[in-house]
Amino acid sequence: MTLINGLPAHVLLVHLVVVLVPLTALALVVAAVSPRAARRMGVVLPLLALVTLVGVPLTTQAGEWLERHVDDDALVRRHAELGDGLLPWALGLFLLAALVWWAGRSSAAASGPDSAGTSVWSGTPLRVAAVVLSLVVAAGAVVDVYRIGDSGAKAAWHDGFTQSASNGATDH
């Protein structure tokens, strides 16, 4: 994918990633910490993580196309390097989302319809590991998206504006 309605696809797809990665990270942490929330989210959690996972390489590929069509710039190269590191975080979000969904589904089936909403796996080392890993991967993914976005904004705007208004307007 290179252009969408005459615009570089990257500048549009990046919004998908900037929204979905933090949203997926938040949903994952909530579901990992709260088995009840995991059951309520159901299959939406791994599907959200899957859409996020698919969106990352699409955005990265569109960014690589754009990189070949702009002037060579150290800020653009830095942004591209950082962007290449997001896929492992998105994969981690997906794998953990699938695990949390599966575990919540399995524990709901094992506890039956008459349970008080407690999870069979709530005290197991697997759940503790899932919570810790979810927190680490969610934080890493969000921080990485921030760093990538910051570098992209700097690359796009580093000399594209002035402190003073150019249309005759004055700052108040």
Image (spheres, helix red, strand yellow):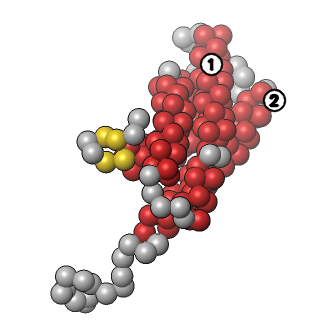
Residue 21 visible? no
Residue indicated by mark 2: 125
Instruction: Indicate whether 159 appears above or below 39.
Output: below
Residue 103 horizontal side relative to residue 60, left or right:
right
Looking at the image, which is closer to me, 124 or 151? 151
Q: Tell me whether the residue at label 1 lies in contact with that at label 2, contact meaning CB atoms closer than 8 angstroms.
A: no
Residue 15 horizontal side relative to residue 120, left or right:
left
**Amino acid type, residue under disc 2 in the picture:** Pro
Instruction: Indicate whether 3 appears above or below 48.
Output: below
**Residue 147 x/y as whole percent:** 59, 59
Does label 1 or label 2 sit earlier along the sequence?
1
| Residue at 31% over, 48% down | 7
Quadrant assignment for the C terminus: bottom left
Which element type, helix, strand or loop, lies under badge 2?
Answer: helix
What whole-number distance in Å separates the C-alpha atoms at marks 1 and 2? Answer: 16 Å
Looking at the image, which is closer to me, 58 or 108? 58
Residue 168 horizontal side relative to residue 85, left or right:
left
**Residue 30 x/y as whole percent:** 57, 39
The quadrant holding residue 87 is: top right
Which element type, helix, strand or loop, lies under badge 1?
Answer: helix
Residue indicated by mark 1: 102
| Residue at 65% over, 30% down | 96
**Residue 74 x/y as whole percent:** 59, 65
Looking at the image, which is closer to me, 63 or 44? 63
Residue at the left extreme of this rendering: 168
